Amino acid sequence: MTDFKPRIAARQDAWIALRRDLHRHPELGFQEVRTAGIVATTLHNLGLEVQTGVGQTGVVALLEGAADGPTVLVRADMDALPIQEENEVPYASQTAGVMHACGHDGHTTIALAVAELLSAHRAELAGRVKFVFQPAEEIGRGAQAMIAAGALQAPVPQVSLGLHLWNEVSVGAVALVDGPMMAAACDMTITIQGRGGHGALPHETRDPIVAGCQIVSALQTIVSRNVRPTEVAVVSVTEFKAGDSFNVIPASARLRGTLRAFRTEMIALLEERVRAVSEEIAAALGCQAEVAVEQVTLPVINDTGVNERLAAVFRAVAPDVRLIRNFQTMAAEDMSYFLEAVPGAFFFVGSANPQRGLDYPHHHPRFDFDEAAIPLAAELLATAVASYVLPGAQPERAE
Ligand code: NI
């Protein structure tokens, strides 16, 4: 197997410095202009053929090997979140209200490190590696935008790989899961139309707040009473907006939330029940409910064959890494669109370090991760890609 360790040891400090620079300058979805510029320049300097502006701020780069062979897609995401950072670290966000609170600064760094590691072996490569740096993962739009802009064409990849740093898992462990790993997600909006009026004269109104409260309560029965108990699903109301005064019953209320499941059929069931419960409860209370459901991501489904190869690679290159094979989360990822089009694997690289206080959850204002995950993730991903395009890089023994 190709040994990337000496180069990783020599370069890891520079990669961590890059991650900190990206962390200092977070950018929201479809606004990743500075980040995309750094990505494009770095890849160009490595000698890759770079395309910018793919799906607005996305970057695609091709590392062409000397001989023919398969095309492997490596995907990373670049966007940050609308969160005010509360960490007091030298590399804290310098942009008010915007923060890399999900680790995408790490993902961008890791994919650039992989490009660097593999481009050093260009003369031995049989095939090519297509690096896809996508915008707007957090709003579930970037992958689709890049695919619509042709990111999966010319050349068409045969396998797609990606990873997420994951703070539910400690650094030194990796979750590599067959089949469904992350949930399909839908945004739901329930608009309740009533009749407003004086707070002291409720009998003359049709109160959308009371209807909304009943709807929120009744939605809790969908998972407990309609979903087969051995399956998983989530219905969460995350926003309830109505009224702005002590003595006025408003004319309307708005609920928003999320639906999650691993199967498309289950999403359809959740949607049907949300509609029926909302419309009929609203009607019973003299109001009208209008339900809008929009799919944000597909489920992340990993290919078992690709996973088997990766498991063997990881065991061979990093025998000390604890490999977790049964880990599912209802969090969502638009990597699902790449995996739907091109079979592959998306895995979690553990990034928490509770002893150092680096275990806040993703999307928390104090989220941060153990940077030791960066060189490890780069090694695992580079070796996984190499197993396809570097002859002789296959692990000796598959388990
Ligand atoms: Ni993320």
Image: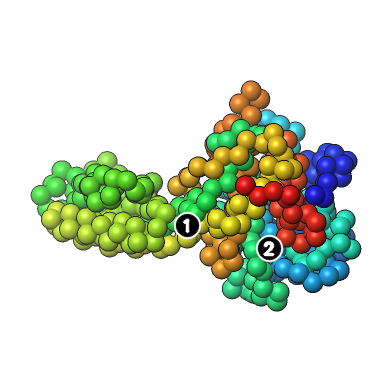
For disc 2, the marked residue is: 73
Q: Quadrant of residue 63?
A: bottom right
User: Residue 184: where, in percent of width, then height?
Assistant: 44, 56
Say whether residue 386 is visible. yes
User: Residue 55: where, in percent of width, then height?
Assistant: 63, 69
Coloured how? rainbow
Other-residue count near label 2 (Cα within 10 Å), few / some / many at <14 / 14–19 / ≥20: many
Q: Which one is earlier in the sequence, the residue at label 1 or at label 2? A: 2
User: Residue 330: where, in percent of width, then height?
Assistant: 45, 47
Q: Nearer the viewer, residue 41 or 382?
A: 382
Q: Is residue 267 left or right of residue 199?
A: right
Outermost residue on the left side: it is 203
Q: Nearer the viewer, residue 287 or 169?
A: 169
Say whether residue 86 is visible. no
Residue, x 72% and y 60% (percent of image)? 388
For disc 1, the marked residue is: 299
Query: Does residue 263 sit above or below 91 in this rendering?
Result: below
Determine the secondary structure under disc 1.
Answer: loop
**Mark 1 belongs to which amino acid?**
Pro
